[in-house]
Image (cartoon, rainbow, N blue to C red):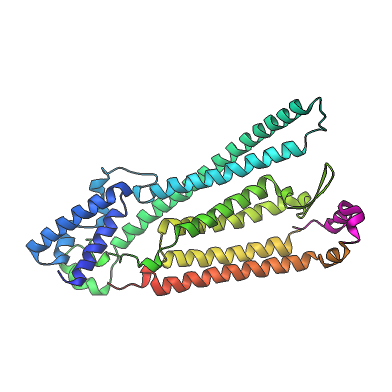
């Protein structure tokens, strides 16, 4: 068996086992290696062997009991892992926020009513937190399931169209065989190790996006300058909360676009043309939405400096130098520049790794 034929065999096996549950893959890999080797020894041509076995997408169905899936085996384990991460990130921060809000808003505690007041505050906080957490988890679960289901459908459509690809080079072959018949030439290469997208990087991005979105939706007042004086706690919000209903949808939309891009990277698992295009498009949209939020919408608290001075009281004079530096436009420009720089850097790295290592430029 030549190196080129061995490469074709590896590609075929990879395309079969990637569609199976992880627990089956090693066993099926060994079984296919033995089967293909035996057939090769008999026929003497890897192309004849793989053509006889047929399209790996169809061949893998004999291990799947021909079931139809909302989310197939290829994505299911990733989907389960992703749902767990998202649900934890959606529920835990809300429970913590609700408890903190309930405790901070409870009435004055004395030695006589300390226990009942604290217990009531904790119960109220947990009740509100569980209710909001359930709503958040249901929404998150639905969004994640819908996203993966769409990817499952689009993957199937893409593979069907790819199997019907026509070219002038196959003109002579098509005279002898059906044009839609699968051949080993359709096999994609096994991804280069350097083309694999780190699952840890995707997880970090997903956790940040989900937690940040939860905070923006359920606790925008947490983004504030907080001062304590004795038992009194004063919070000066950074955001313009009176206009938050107009600002939040654009903010969350930008984060959701980033989440979709992270899901795609996680599902595909390696740098390729699809990941590159998604990253470029999502990055461009996020830059535009960030510009809208930071430069068009009234995101910043217009009374931030005044409220800060009142909260500081006697210490306002010592902080006067800092307060003179606060400028909403300057802060917006700085954040927007940072977002653009980070987004362009990520796009640049994705383009480089796709062109350098990505499977889309590999040759058979």
The reply to whether residue 183 is visible in this rendering is: no
- Residue 4 visible? The answer is yes
Report the quarter where the N terminus lies: bottom left
Q: Is residue 128 above or below residue 40?
A: above
- Relative height, residue 63 to residue 179 (above, below): above
Q: Position of residue 231 (x, y in %)?
A: 83, 41
Q: Is 118 left or right of 6, judged from the image as shown?
A: right
Q: How many marks?
A: 0
* Residue situated in front as seen by the camera: 201 or 271: 201
Q: Position of residue 344 (x, y in %)?
A: 57, 71
Q: Which residues are magenta?
A: 300-318
| Magenta stretch: includes residue 309 | yes
Q: Is residue 242 left or right of residue 49?
A: right
Q: Residue furthest front?
A: 111
Residue 134 locus on image (x, y percent): 58, 37
| Quadrant (top left/top right/bottom left/bottom right) for the C terminus | bottom left
Identify the residue at image location x=42%, y=55%.
Answer: 267
Question: Residue 5, located in which quarter of the rendered image?
Answer: bottom left
- At 56% from the left edge and 42% from the top edge, which residue is drawn? 139
Looking at the image, which residue sits at the far left? 42
Is residue 97 within the magenta segment? Answer: no
Q: Residue at x 28, y 51 (%)?
A: 25
Q: Give the answer, above or below, for where 198 lies relative to 70.
A: below
- Residue 98: image x %, image y %? 68, 39
Residue 30 falls in image quadrant: bottom left
Dominant secondary-structure state across the stretch colored magenta: helix
Residue 20 placement, left or right of 349: left
């Amino acid at each position: 068996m030549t190196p080129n034929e061995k490469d074709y065999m590896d590609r075929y096996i990879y395309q079969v086992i990637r569609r199976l549950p992880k627990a089956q893959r090693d066993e099926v890999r060994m079984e296919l290696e033995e089967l293909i080797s035996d057939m090769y020894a008999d026929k003497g041509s890897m192309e004849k062997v793989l053509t006889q076995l047929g399209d790996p997408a169809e061949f893998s169905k004999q291990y799947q009991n021909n079931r139809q899936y909302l989310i197939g085996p290829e994505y299911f384990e990733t989907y389960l892992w992703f749902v767990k991460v998202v649900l934890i990130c959606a529920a835990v921060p809300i429970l913590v926020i609700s408890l903190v809000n309930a405790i901070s808003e409870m009435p004055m505690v004395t030695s006589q009513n300390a226990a009942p007041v604290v217990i009531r505050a904790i119960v109220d906080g947990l009740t509100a937190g569980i209710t909001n957490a359930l709503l958040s988890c249901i929404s998150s679960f639905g969004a994640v399931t819908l996203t993966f289901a769409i990817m499952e459908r689009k993957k199937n459509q893409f593979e069907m169209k790819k199997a019907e690809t026509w070219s002038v080079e196959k003109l002579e072959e098509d005279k002898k065989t059906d044009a839609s018949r699968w051949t080993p030439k359709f096999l994609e290469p096994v991804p280069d190790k350097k083309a694999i997208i780190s699952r840890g990087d995707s997880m970090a991005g997903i956790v940040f996006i989900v937690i940040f979105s939860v905070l923006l939706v359920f606790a925008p007042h947490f983004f504030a300058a907080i001062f304590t004086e004795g038992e009194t706690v004063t919070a000066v919000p950074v955001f313009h909360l009176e206009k938050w209903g107009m600002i939040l949808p654009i903010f969350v939309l930008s984060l959701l676009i980033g989440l979709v891009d992270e899901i795609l990277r996680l599902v595909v698992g390696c740098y390729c043309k699809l990941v590159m295009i998604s990253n470029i498009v999502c990055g461009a949209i996020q830059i535009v939405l960030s510009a809208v939020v930071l430069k068009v919408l009234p995101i910043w608290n217009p009374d931030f400096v005044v409220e800060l001075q009142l909260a500081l009281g006697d210490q306002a004079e010592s902080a006067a130098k800092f307060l003179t530096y606060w400028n909403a436009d300057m802060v917006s420009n700085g954040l927007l520049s940072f977002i653009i720089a980070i987004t362009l850097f990520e796009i640049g790295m994705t383009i480089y790794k796709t062109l350098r290592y990505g499977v889309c430029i590999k040759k058979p």
